[in-house]
Structure formats: C-alpha cells, structure tokens
Image (tube, rainbow, N blue to C red):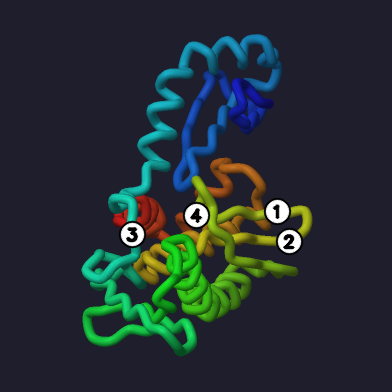
Amino acid sequence: MQMNGVDIEVERKNIKNVHLSVYPPDGRVHISVPLNYPDSSIQMYILQKWVWIKEKQQQLTSYDFQPDRQYVSGEEHYFKGEKYRLKVNRMSTGAYMVYIKGDYIVLNIHEDTSIDNARQTLYQWYRQQLSPILDKLIAKWCKILGVGLNEWDIRLMASRWGSCIDSESKAYFNVELAKKPIDCIEYVVAHELTHLIEHNHTDRFHHLLDIHLPRWQELSKKLNEFPI
C-alpha cells in the first residue's frame, strides 16, 4: 500500500489490535492488522498517525552530516569510524591519488580540479576501500544465515544504508558506509541479507536478528548517530 508517496508494509495477522512501526535504518513503515481489517480502516489509521510517522522517519534517517564540504585542506572527514583531516595537494602534473598518512586523508589532484571532481575522486577511493570489507562480511553472513547472494554493488544513496531485492538475490550498499565503524557496516549487511529470508520487517525478521546479531538495535542507533 502507498500513501502520499510512502510505501506502507501491511501484514495481516491473527491479532486483535493494530500495531504501527517505523523501522531503522531507512524509516520504512510497517503496520500489522487483524485478518479481516479493511483497507479503508488501514488508510484512516495511517492518516491519523501521519505526523508521528513523518517525525519518526525524520529521526531515523537524519544523518549527522558535516557542513557542505569544499574539499580543501583542514576539513574533517571520516573513514571506518575514525576522524581525519583532509590534506589536498593541487599539482600541475601527476595522477589523482588518495591515501592515509597519519591523521590525514591525503588527496592529490590537478590544480584545476573542480570541487565536484575532487569529491568524486575521494568517493571512488571510499568505494575501493569499502568493497573488500563488504565482500568479507557478505560471505560471513551468507554462511550464518544460510542464504546466497547473486549480486551486490556499492552506490551513493540519499536515504538508505542498503537495500535488498530478495526476489533476485541482489543487494546494494551506500558508499557512505565507508565512513562508519566496522560493526555498523556489519549490521547493515546482516540486516539486508536477512531480507533474503524475510522480506518485511516482521516479528520473524527481528527474531532472526535477535538470534544472530543480539546487538542490532544498539548498532542501528550508533549507525544513524555517527557523523559522516
């Protein structure tokens, strides 16, 4: 069901009361209703709770962004949960390059490089660093959950840390995860791969996380509070 551009996951169960939840990390909305509860009543209930839903989504998806970056020396940037200062070397010759030296992320770029190209260079490096981390964690969690993943990729996402297309066994992860602590990255991997077993955020879904990653709620909070 969709209302005002928001997807609502509807689950009919043998229950007496309506249960509405907004789940991290992406603010997805799930409502459990009695078996014979009509769609019109679901829509009315959602509308009555609309302000609460939007406030909850804003709380869960509000990343702690730093001010708009100019990609100049001295800015704060993060990698695997650690804070670094950016050092930008603008040169007349030489290849674009990013590396860590002490407390600095060093960005070597051409003297005429635009802010947008500097950002793309840094994010390409983030992608390269995140890929082997995800590769290892995906292999680990496929084994734990007894699932298989046909394809995965890294993308820049506006409001999600990851997504899973369970029907195709595909998963996508936000490149911003490269800035997060490893245990937070692992939570996102576990979360998305659990969707290969249970599509929606049902009681079964959360029970699986409780079994295999008991700290998942703590990690979810840490993930969304940690600055990027």
Q: Which residue is label 3 attached to?
A: 70
Looking at marks 3 and 4 on the same chain, the residue that comes earlier in the sequence is marked by 3
* Real-space CA distance between mark 3 and mark 1, rounded to the nearest whole angstrom: 35 Å
Residue 100: x %, y % from top left: 33, 84
Q: Which residue is label 2 attached to?
A: 169
For the residue marked with disc 3, what is the amino acid? Gln
Q: Which residue is label 1 attached to?
A: 165
Q: Is residue 47 above or below residue 10?
A: above
Residue 55: x %, y % from top left: 38, 27
Residue drawn at x 61%, y 27% as measured from the top left: 5
User: Label 2: how many residues lie within 10 Å, few (<14), some (14-19) or many (20+)?
Assistant: some
* Real-space CA distance between mark 2 and mark 1, rounded to the nearest whole angstrom: 6 Å
Q: Is residue 119 visible?
A: yes
Looking at marks 3 and 1 on the same chain, the residue that comes earlier in the sequence is marked by 3
Side of 174 where 199 appears, left or right: right
Residue 124: x %, y % from top left: 51, 72
Residue drawn at x 36%, y 36% as measured from the top left: 59
Question: What label sits on residue 161 in the rendered view?
Answer: 4
For the residue marked with disc 4, what is the amino acid? Trp
Q: Are marks 2 and 3 in contact (CB under 8 Å)?
A: no
4 or 2: mark nearer the eye = 4
Q: Is residue 225 visible?
A: no
Which residue lies most toward the bottom here? Answer: 94
For the residue marked with disc 2, what is the amino acid? Ser
Residue drawn at x 55%, y 56% as measured from the top left: 162
- Between 138 and 194, the residue placed more toward the observer is 138
2 or 3: mark nearer the eye = 3
Mark 4: secondary structure: loop
Looking at marks 2 and 3 on the same chain, the residue that comes earlier in the sequence is marked by 3
